[in-house]
Every structure is written in C-alpha cells, then in structure tokens.
Amino acid sequence: MKLELRGITKRFGDLVANDHIDLVVEPGEIHALLGENGAGKSTLMNVLYGLLRPDEGEILVNDVPQTFRSPGDAISAGIGMVHQHFMLVPVFTVAENIMLGAEDTKLGVLDKKKASAHITEVSQTYGLPVDPEAVVETLPVGVQQRVEIVKALTREVDLLILDEPTAVLTPQETDELLEVLRGLKAAGKSIVLITHKLREVKAIADKITVIRRGKVVGTADPGESEDELAAMMVGRHVQLVVDKSAAEPGAPVLTVKDLSVVDDRGHRAVTDIDLEVRAGEVLGVAGVQGNGQTELIEAIMGLRPAVSGSVLLGGAELRGRTTRQVLDAGVGYVPEDRSTDGLVKEFTVAENLVLDLYKSEPFGSKLVYRPEAVARNAKDRIEEFDVRTQSADAPVGSLSGGNQQKVIVAREMSRPLKLLIASQPARGVDVGSIEFIHKRIIRERDQGGAVLLVSTELDEILALADRIAVMYRGEIIATLPAAGATSEKLGLLMAGVTGD
Ligand SMILES: Nc1ncnc2c1ncn2[C@@H]1O[C@H](COP(=O)(O)OP(=O)(O)OP(=O)(O)O)[C@@H](O)[C@H]1O
Ligand SMILES: [Mg+2]
C-alpha cells in the first residue's frame, strides 16, 4: 500500500499535537517514526487508524483520499494497528480476542471453528505461532504482542502500524519481532514503526521521519549514527552513556535473606534469594523478564507476601509491613508497569506528583491538604523533569506514555530516600529523558542513596550498575562487579549458562 498523509493537524484544546504533518510510506517499506515523548507520534497514528478525527489534512491510500470515521473504516482500507498499550481482554482466549470487533470485517460471523482455522493459517503464513485456545492473561508479554499482530493480520492489512512494540519485550522477543517485520515486508506489506530504540531503527528501517513538538523536523537515513538520530529527535546533543565515577559503597541499606515468594498462581517465583545493596551503590538486577524479578520487588515493597526469609532496611524488618509503611520508611519505588501501579489516570498531574505524600508535610497533614504546596511542587517537578503537559491540572491519563513515566520518576526521586527501587525506569522514555533519568539515578547514588535497579535492558544495567546480580528461574545465579562485565557474558548468564 502507498500511504500519504498531507498536512495532518490535530489539536487538543490549545495544544497542537500534530501540526501540518506530511508523511509518505511506500509499498513494502518499513518506515520508522521517531520523536521525543509527547512529539505527537501516537496521536498521528490514532488519526491514521480512525480513532481520532484530524482537524485538517488528508489521508490518501494508493492516491485515493479517505475519510476514516472509525478504526473499522481504516481496517476496511487495509490498515492495522498494534497499540502502545495492549488492547487485549485478559480473560478471553486468543481466538475470542481476535474475533472481537471482527464482525464488520472479512472474517465475518462469530464462528469459532472458522476463526481458529483462520488464525492458524495466518500464524503459519507469517511465522507467528499462537494457540487460539490459550487465555491471554496466562501468556508472556511477547506472545500477547504476537496475538495483537495476528489479530491485525487476520483483517488482511496492507499497512501495519506498530506503536512502541518492543518497549516491553525481552531482547530475544525483540529479535523475533524484527524477523517477523522483515517477513511482512517481504510479503509486500508496509509498516510504520514507532520506537525509542535507535538500534532497532538502524537495524530494520528503510526510511526515518522525525517529529518534534508536533512538526516534521526532517527525514533521516538508517545509516545515520545513533548520536545524529538522537540529536535530531530532541534538538540537542544527547549523551547516550552517562558519566560516572567509581562507587564508594558504605553500610548495607537493604539486606534480603533467604527470601522466597510465590507468584499469582501459587508457583514458586523466587527461591532463597540473598542480596545486599549498600549506601552509595547501584545494584543492577539483570534477567529476562519473568524470572522472578517482579515478585522479588513486589515482596520487598509489601505488595506481595513472602513465603519465608527477611527483608531488612537499615537493619529493620520490612516484611509484614504495608506498602505505605515501606514507602514511609524511605523507599522510593518506580514500578515496572506504570499503568497499574504508579499512577491514578483520572487524577491530575499535580495530584499524581504527590500521590504517596499528600498526607505529609509540606503538602498537608492527616487533617489538611495544602493545594498551594501541591501546585508549587508540580510546577517545579514539571520543569525539572521536563514533563510535557498542557497544565499541572490535566489528568495524567492525557499525557503521552513517556511523559506519564516521567511523572512517576519525578515523584519518587524528589524526596529524601534511603533506597530507590527502580524497575525499568526508562521504559517508553525518549533518549533525552533517559539521559536525564540516568543522571539522576547516579546522583542519588553519589549522595549516599542505595539503588536497586531492575532492568531487562543490558545497556541500562551496564551503564548504571556498580554490581550486577543475574536472576534466572527465581534465583540469583551470579553476582559480579560491573567493571569488566560484557553484554555477551551477561547474555549467557541470563540464559542460565554459568560455566566459564
Ligand atoms: N486525549 C488527549 N487529550 C489531551 N491531550 C492529549 C490527548 N492525547 C494526547 N494528548 C497530548 O498530545 C501530545 C502528543 O501526545 P502523543 O501521545 O501523540 O505523543 P507521543 O509522541 O506518542 O509520545 P510518547 O513517546 O511519550 O508515547 C502530548 O502533549 C499529549 O499530552
Ligand atoms: Mg506514544
């Protein structure tokens, strides 16, 4: 399909999210859309997919102007979309999810057998194995993603939009996805790919368009260096790897001993873990998603009971305390899933910035709430962390994905902490903000804080950690100094290979 966007403009009140955007995607082309958080990428794709009506501009498919009143219209024109936030119904099976809303497409009636056969056919054609009968919530994220893609492909799309598809994928899942995209391209499909990961863009894109503050700032060739692409996205030089000196670790702050935790299904997720984080050091927990990191952190945070073991903060037992009490004890927490744990979408940005703190000074006490202090704090944090929002009083749910993440990081890193627990702190965040967040984590360390960093991104672990613990199947199978660690070695450890 040849797709052409001409002069697309979309406003939200006074905010111009898309400002006369022109974009051409040729048949069989993988076109990467780059831009900082809040640049307008998702908005543009939502316009193209019929979820939002543009205020101005035209969409042409194979040179014919289109009017999309709903995703149904876009789908009929051969456009499919995999959203930034998954849209699957967790308790439904794969087949049920894929059939949802398909009534008005070529798939036709809700015939389960026919649907399953069709799904199997699509998965075989494109090398995307999925089990039509599996319940979505039991599937790993990478497979859920595959379901989304199969869902789009069952509707016979010629152009597939993927909005940050790799943000929650493991390195292996990412490689598999890139392979799938190459296959789709070979089958003549056009692809629009949104991602903050420049390496992926360089690996797979045929063409790159960069947008900033709603406007196209230029196109680039995948041959450009990551430095050049980063600078084009944010309009300044970005330091991709943070400068830091050697750690000067002090007394132990967090001591975890013999900790065992079970997952939601009652299976052992963490087995007899010991770990220690000292003042002034960053301990990085590396591992492929799903090896117990989530349960480990939830147990430390009082979000999930531990089966046995102890969690000491400066010598005091945290086990048995509520999450509120753990936070009050001086633990900052950036959760891995911002949409379920970190934010209340309907609350304003200002309120979300004091979510755990509104009952404490200076924002209030048990009895009072001080709106002026909350507003002042919001103004400062928004400036400091470069949160792009129309106002401090906008609901946090109206912010772009990366800016929502910045709200959490800003809140958690702006009070005195003994320990910062950061899970995937840079998830969905643009290169400029990653630079900033990474600097802040190192600053926290240099001021004597202890930092427990959990990340599936090896680059992030290698950039920030002083020591690295590798988790595999619920255990820490190795702890090593970061100096001298290589991604090859860590990659092997993450796959459970411990021999030299
Ligand atoms: N429904 C909405 N109401 C009000 N403002 C909105 C709405 N949706 C998006 N915006 C605003 O439009 C701008 C562009 O947001 P968009 O989600 O398109 O950014 P993005 O480029 O996808 O960013 P990210 O990389 O963080 O996902 C942001 O300033 C955002 O706050
Ligand atoms: Mg987005």
Image: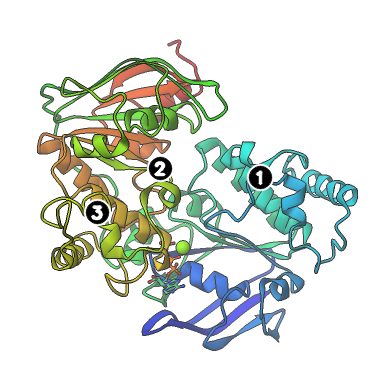
Q: Amino acid at mark 2?
A: Glu
Q: Residue at x 25, y 46 (%)?
A: 438
Q: Is residue 158 above or below residue 285?
A: below
Q: Earlier in the sequence, mark 1 or mark 3?
A: 1
Q: Is residue 169 left or right of residue 300?
A: right
* Mark linked to residue 336: 2
Is residue 19 visible to the viewer in this orientation of the structure? no
Q: Is residue 102 above or below residue 477?
A: below
Q: Is residue 299 above or below residue 416?
A: above
Q: Position of residue 186 (x, y in %)?
A: 72, 55
Q: Earlier in the sequence, mark 1 or mark 2?
A: 1
Q: Do the numbered discs 1 and 2 sit on residues whose CB atoms are within 8 Å?
A: no
The local secondary structure at tag 3 comes to helix
Q: Residue at x 51, y 55 (%)?
A: 164
Q: Is residue 344 left or right of residue 433?
A: right
Distance in Å between CA atoms under marks 3 and 2: 15 Å
Between residues 478 and 336, which one lies in front from this camera angle?
A: 336
Q: Mark 1 — residue?
A: 91
Q: Mark 3 — residue?
A: 410
